[in-house]
Amino acid sequence: MIVCFGSINLDLVFPLPALPLPGQTVLGKAMHTEPGGKGANQAVAAARDGGQVLFAGAVGQDALADQALALLKDAGVDLSRVARTDTSTGCASICVDPQGGNHIAVASGANLLAVQSQVEDALLGPSTTVLLQAETDLAETATLIRRAKARGARVVLNLAPAAKLADDALRAVDVLVVNEDEGRWLGDSLGTGGDAAALHAALGMAVVRTLGGDGLEVATGHGVRTLPVHKVEVVDTTAAGDCFTGVLAAALDRGLDLNAAIRRATVAAALCCAKAGSQGSLPWAAATGTALAA
């Protein structure tokens, strides 16, 4: 089982001819809404890849909540540990240009009220993969990592957005996923380099650093490897990192080794980039399997 503790947002997506510069207004033709949030995106990605996923998080009691939960429900994610609060549901504004680049602003709302006690001890054990990000309260995230580690669960952390997590909790993670900016930030905070090799040397766990169109690098006790991207025509990169992390967690949870899990996650993330949107662009297992076999 995968237990995902994280954020739930409703995304407001603005396709634009160009991303706005500071102080600039750029007019687009239309806006659409789509469920999002790093936690929810990763949970949907894992579930669509065949994982049994339980989600713990929080939404409001406003008009955004049901829309924000719609694709989690559609993917079969267990939402019994999602709290309804009096605070607004998390919301993100996503500007996307014709090349697939994006600017994202997030109002956290109810996400900051999610608490690790929503995940009871019975859900944590050697057969559980705990999947986490950094869009919820970091003290709650750190406590859940400690609890999960003490009970023998595998912990996968996507330190996104880059943020300060308690050192002992960070070092208890089994697989750390960062992008270039997050890796650089973490390396600076540790007084080391921000590449996968330097982060692995400093922290000890498996480190995956995604490099956008340049692929990724992974560092473990067996050394450092680089992998290229799976080539597609990029339409929209929104949620690609979340897709990668969710599919990685699902693949590890069902017993694939790290290298095979990374390969599958890389292909799934590429398929995500080939479609417009955020959560709706996450591929199902059959599509990923077909692309892997091609």
Image: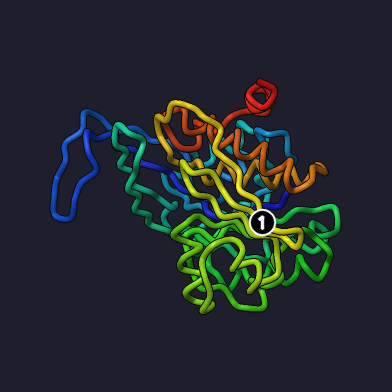
Residue at (66% x, 58% y) in the render: 219
Quarter holding residue 285: top right
Tag 1: amino acid: Val
Q: Nearer the viewer, residue 205 or 142?
A: 205
Instruction: In the displayed orientation, state which residue is furthest to the left.
Output: 24
How was the colour assigned to the protein in this rendering? rainbow
Residue at (43% x, 38% y) in the render: 237
Residue at (34% x, 53% y) in the render: 105
Residue at the disc numbered 1: 224
Task: Tell me if residue 244 can be seen.
Answer: yes
Residue 172: % across, % down? 71, 70
For the image, the number of numbered tags is 1
Residue at (56% x, 73% y) in the render: 165
Quadrant, the C terminus: top right
Q: Residues within 10 Å of mark 1 (few under 14, many from 20)?
A: some
Q: Nearer the viewer, residue 237 or 126?
A: 237
Residue 28: % across, % down? 20, 33
Residue 134: % across, % down? 53, 62
Dot 1 lies on which element? strand
Q: In the image, 159: left or right of 27?
A: right
Residue 84: % across, % down? 54, 53
Q: In the image, 274: left or right of 57?
A: left
Q: In the image, 137: left or right of 294?
A: left
